[in-house]
Amino acid sequence: MKKLTISLAVCSAILAFGQQENKDSLKVQNIQEVLMTKKVFKKESDRFVYEVANAPVAKGNTTFDILKQTPLISSTDDTNLKIAGKNNAIIYINGRKSNMDAASLVQFLKNTPAENIQKIEVITMPGSEFQVEASDGIINIILKKKSTDGLNGNMRLSSSVNKYSNNSASFTGNYRKDKLGISANLSGGANIQAQYYEMRNGNRLVTNESTGYIDDPNQNLGGYMNIDYQLNDNSNIALSWNSWANKSYHANINFFNTLRTYDQQGNLLDTNFSNSRNQENARSYNNNFNLNYELKTDSLGSKLNLNAAYLNYKRFQMTDNNTIAAFADGTDGLLTRYVYQDLPQIINNFSGTADYTQKFKEDFTVSVGANFNSTETDNDTQNTTYDYLYDNSGQLTGTEVTATPNHFVYNENIYGFYLTLEKKLSDKFSGKVGARYEITSSTGTSDNQQDPSLRRIERNYNNILPYISLNYALNDHHNLSYSFSSRMRRPSFWELNPVKNLLTEYNYTQNNPFVKASETYNQELTYMYKNSYFVILNHSLFKDVLTQVPLQGFPVSPDGTVGTVNQLRYIRTNFGTKQEMSAALGINKAFFKQALSLNFNIGVQHNINKGSLAVDPTTGDRFLSADGQFVAYVNDTKSTSLFIQTNNSVRLDSKKTWFLGVSYFYVDQQQIELGLLKDLMSLDFNIKKIWNDWTFTLSVNDVLRTNIIEITDVQDNGNYNAIRNDMYRQSVGASIVYNFGNKKVKKVRDINDASSDVKSRTR
């Protein structure tokens, strides 16, 4: 469904310590003391490690629940996981990138028992061997190694209510017999994503106000199957398939628009009312196949890993956009404009990876690898506009029809090579250095560009991306580390598809085939004390930032034609530079014999934005202000904001069957690309009961109903823009999980997907 995309990075830190009950002699008590002091959260060379197996909170929880309680990881919407100071978190399992798309991955994490997890690694600055973009971090889930044959799994039912009810169900099974392992999942659900918008923009001569609702119903069905076979003691072969389908029919946009015009003295000249009533029918399909071969080459852990994958993504979207003249009370009048859009997108990707890790004695490791991606996207869009003309009596006198089809095909080839060296120089000092070399070649063709030079767009560039990580353990209580990395952020394929998504007649979003990859440089300094207290200093520099930019005014086309109505266009484009600096102080500690697990961090973030855009890069249009001067959108601002995040768990009984969870986050107002983002916060509660193999959970999210987005921007030229977006975060939910079968069944080996980095760029 059409919406503005806003990314918010919110820091969190959560930790629970394990305790073992002993009732015998002093000798046993001494053993207990040793177990209690075993490190649950620690800093290694290039990552933080959370030993889930040593923490009792894993009992009855899902993997998603445990991730939210892992230091440095947060989720503000119970869907997306973020790492402190990072735009996004990429999920790895046993050192391999997950081969599921975002929607099915969330279902997988929410329906996988946390008892399967040995530890969770949080890599805030991934090395050269990882295929990540921009400032993304990595969450690496290490599963327990089990050896028993048999079948196990779980079934899960969940339901929540905000404005509408949302329901889901899933079944997961794991089977192992001798050398064969099979894991499978089937999940589905139905929900309605509701939003309320207030949008105001204009200048001293023209103002436009739109208020209304978006209701986007969704039906989802997906699953995966992994088949792993052990050829011998040193090699495995595996085939993985995952699929996800979404159907969103009868999604509705209903906005009431008020357009006011004024004279130079500020006197109201005219007021026009209209209704935007748009309906969208869309469906999408995502299928991925991956073949993996792994060979262990020695007893030290050296190995070769090969992957070949195919990804097919299809999305079919048809939209009816109606502009209806209205009265002041919102009652419909005459239909003035109808726009029909057919916006298909088909993506085919072939990819392969080859990784080899050679481990030497004396803690020295060399990793080398290569990857290849070949992608074609086909976007055959159809746009037809019908303008209806009426006489003074309201009788239809004519219809103007304008067709603007565009067949846009985008081909992209990426070659990547990396080398990483890791060495433990002493008991106190270790380091890791590496570099990644990437070659990108892309071509976009369009059959409906009037300018012949724009019918074929070629972009070829090579990048060397260095990486370094240094770690120094002063003693058992003090640890200091520094990391630097350079990355690229390539545009998603839907961002390149040059389609226009209409919100109202004069307010729309526009994708852009001319955008290029942005560059990111990240630095991080970390200090940790007693594995319970930490300080993280982070700095990120973004060049050619890829974002949405609001261009506003009376459009002037390249041939000099001046528009008669003030327009607001959200254009996807490269927009200057941005710096993000943050300092966070965190504590992860248990009190009252592990009954209370306190997880808290507080910090400040400083943003520096510097960018300017005067011309619509998709049309060449410029914009006039109320004074008849050409204007640009300028964001040359700085802001400093406070953030607080706490996630706490309270054990309510001695048998560890009742738990209370309390979570809270606050993000102070800060400057982003679209303007000044107002402060956000949310208070959440949940209570959990564990009964044998059953887990019952009741949750309340956004209790105070304060998680609502508001953005304002006022330009020196007099243009202003304000957005208020309520996504109905306040909700009440319940879930039931039943675990069955042999709990010691060895899980099927999770396989890295050669096309995982491409799938993240589909939707």
Image (cartoon, rainbow, N blue to C red):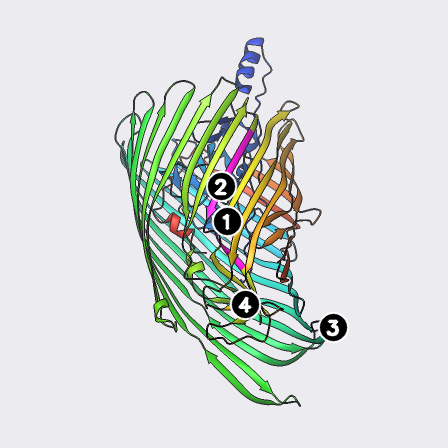
In this rendering, which labeled residue sits more in front, label 4 or label 2? 4
Image x and y of residue 117, in percent: 47, 34
Q: Residues within 10 Å of mark 3 (few under 14, many from 20)?
A: few
Dot 4 or dot 2: first in sequence order is 2
Residue at the disc numbered 4: 623
Q: In the image, is residue 246 part of the stretch drawn in magenta?
A: no
Residue at the disc numbered 3: 267
Image x and y of residue 311, in percent: 35, 54
Callouts 4 and 2 close, C-beta under 8 Å:
no
24 relative to 313 in the view: left or right: right
Q: CA distance from mark 4 to mark 1?
A: 52 Å
Q: CA distance from mark 4 to mark 2?
A: 33 Å
Residue at the disc numbered 2: 540
Residue at the disc numbered 1: 170
Q: Amino acid at mark 4?
A: Phe
Dot 4 or dot 3: first in sequence order is 3
Q: Amino acid at mark 3?
A: Asn
Q: Is label 4 in a helix, a strand or a loop? A: strand
What residue range appears in magenta?
535-549
Q: Which residue: 48% across, 18% down?
A: 474
